Amino acid sequence: MKQKRAIKKESLQNTAEKPRYITGLDGIRAIAVLAVIAYHLNFQWASGGLLGVTVFFVLSGYLITDLLISEYNNNGKIDLKNFWIRRARRLLPGMFTMLLVVMSWVTLFKQELLTKLCEDALAAIFYISNWYYVFQDLSYFESFGVTSLLTHFWSLAVEEQFYIIWPLFIGLLLKLPKKLVFSYTLMLAIVSALAMAAMYEPGADPSRIYYGTDTRAFSLLIGAALAMIWPSRKLSQSAPASARISMDLTGTAALLVILFMIWQTNQYQDFLYQGGMVILSVASALLVGAVAHPSSTLNKVLSLQPLKWLGLRSYGIYLWHYPVIALTTPKVNVEGPNPLLITFQLTLILLLAALSYAFIEMPIRHGAITKTWHMVRRGEWQGKVGYYSKFVTVSGIILMLCVISTLGVVSDRIVKASNPINEVSLPLIGPIKEKEVPADKPKEPEEVKPVPPKESRDKDRPEERAPASKPPTPPKPAEPAKEVNKDAKITVIGDSVMISAAAYLEVEFPRLKADGKVGRQMEDAHSIFQQLKSSGQLGDYVVIELGTNGPFDKEQLEELLDLIGEKREVVLVNVRVPRPWQTVVNEVLSETAAERDNVTLVDWYGASASHAEYFGGDGVHLTKTGAKAFTDLIIKELIEVTN
């Protein structure tokens, strides 16, 4: 306790509250925005990159509250009008520039996205995107259909709502004793965190609590609480060695916690919503507190020029990253990460953010519009083109439009090269009926001859075969192919991907019953199997193809397999879906199949690699070629387990 009091006593000084720019906080911004970008690029090592937004929330809560308290202490009140004007000058120019460029691009080249973009833009302009997505039931994690280019505006909406409400609230709070101000703020943070935990439903889509201002406010409030006990303007320029070491160790440990959670967590873990984000928010507050002190070594480390450059432009980088990634990422991606495309995307994001910062955000933040207006009114426009002039602002917009138009053509070529257009076989809607057979009834499977590995095939070519000292050993005779068990009673449950393959399966196995449904998820399967089992209609062999429409955890799958029973053979089919939950689903399926003797896995993800022709325009549903390959894979496994 004595050491803590000494640290605080030496670290705080009662001098005039002068504004101080903390360069190390730019480093925190850089880490946060890079984590978010890595998450949206689907890097597996950044599955928790969405937590970068939580770091931003804590930082915003700290800085805004620090500013408001300082103003109140200096002036005895908070000038709300001036505060909101400063916020608008800081945030609106970059936002309107991004919206202008993206809407121009979509109007010219992606008209199918325009209607959705206009709806989302209206919500973005009024900073209500988070609640708009809640009421529209638009999932942050499981979205299909028309691409939304402004989904990331949900977090900007949460912050802006905080900027509107918090100054009003804290203006009243500051009339109370300081201890009560801190206690009430912390109490509000606890209520918000408890609301998130209480509203979270394991296995269900967490978008409501992810978007909600009420369930995300705790991060902002934790940052605000830090500002009340660790105001940046009262921190001394130096501190004893012991205090400095303690701060640096605390900040470093907090940074490691943040990086570890970005690396190891994902958006589908119960832990995140039942205390994980609170832990991250506290770690972020400790990091901010350590960096905020002028004598902190960690502050100097996080002030390195590359981090500072990214941090200063982090707002613009965040604005631009999502539409750039959404517009340039092919929906059909069977090759894995494309280094060329990723390099292009990152370059474009940084370029657009840098142009916006230099020619739009900074001039307007320093009064370019007001000064230009006064120049025009006084007739001083001619011959006075400077940093604050209308010419610079307008030329910046024009330059950015030219750049985006030029690079857009390059982007379109990269996407087309990575995503060849295929004939799409539209899936049937609804469950497959018992006697339904596709119009182009598949031929009886031909005998497949064993194919040697590529290396041995190359050696067997006459023109490439090296002379041998002795004749080659004759190959072993192939084992006789197993026949289809026509009497096998099989139940197949799947989602829309199974719909396009079910009829082919029913042709091969007369007693197979298939049920595929658009939008079906693992949570829907339990009641289906319960009904089939109680009515005696559940087959001796079961195929489960689920996970296209959203994630599930191991516990859900284990409960379903326990219901089916160990006496039945179960075939699990993994997924290829260009969504964040693909890895989560496939890992759960693989682990479960390895642990149970009566469960086998069909590796559709592996079999479909490098086969863009298998998929339609959405990168999920199958073409005729894909449906045939998908069916053949399942038939092969069923022949094995039914004989």
Image: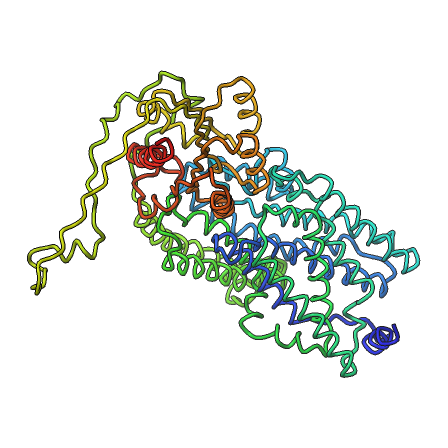
In the figure, is residue 117 to the left or right of 420?
right
Residue at the right extreme, as displayed: 177
In the figure, is residue 616 to the left or right of 255?
left
In the figure, is residue 276 to the left or right of 406?
right
Residue found 56% across the figure and 70% down from its top: 307
Image quadrant in which you'd find residue 207: top right
Residue found 84% across the figure and 53% down from its top: 171
Pinpoint residue 145: horizontal percent, then vertical percent: 47, 35
- Here the colouring is rainbow
Query: Which of the pair 29/458 is nearer the observer?
Result: 458
Query: Which of the pair 245/555 is nearer the observer?
Result: 555
Residue found 12% across the figure and 55% down from its top: 460
Pinpoint residue 579: horizontal percent, then vertical percent: 48, 44
Residue at the bottom extreme, as displayed: 241
Query: Which of the pair 327/175 is nearer the observer?
Result: 327
Check the picture and name the quadrant holding the N terminus.
bottom right
Pinpoint residue 410: horizontal percent, then vertical percent: 34, 54
Reply above or below: 290 against 584.
below
In the figure, is residue 149 to the left or right of 311?
left
Pinpoint residue 73: horizontal percent, then vertical percent: 86, 64
| Numbered marks: total | 0
Reply above or below: 532 against 162.
above
Check the picture and name the quadrant holding the C terminus.
top left
Image quadrant in which you'd find residue 440: top left
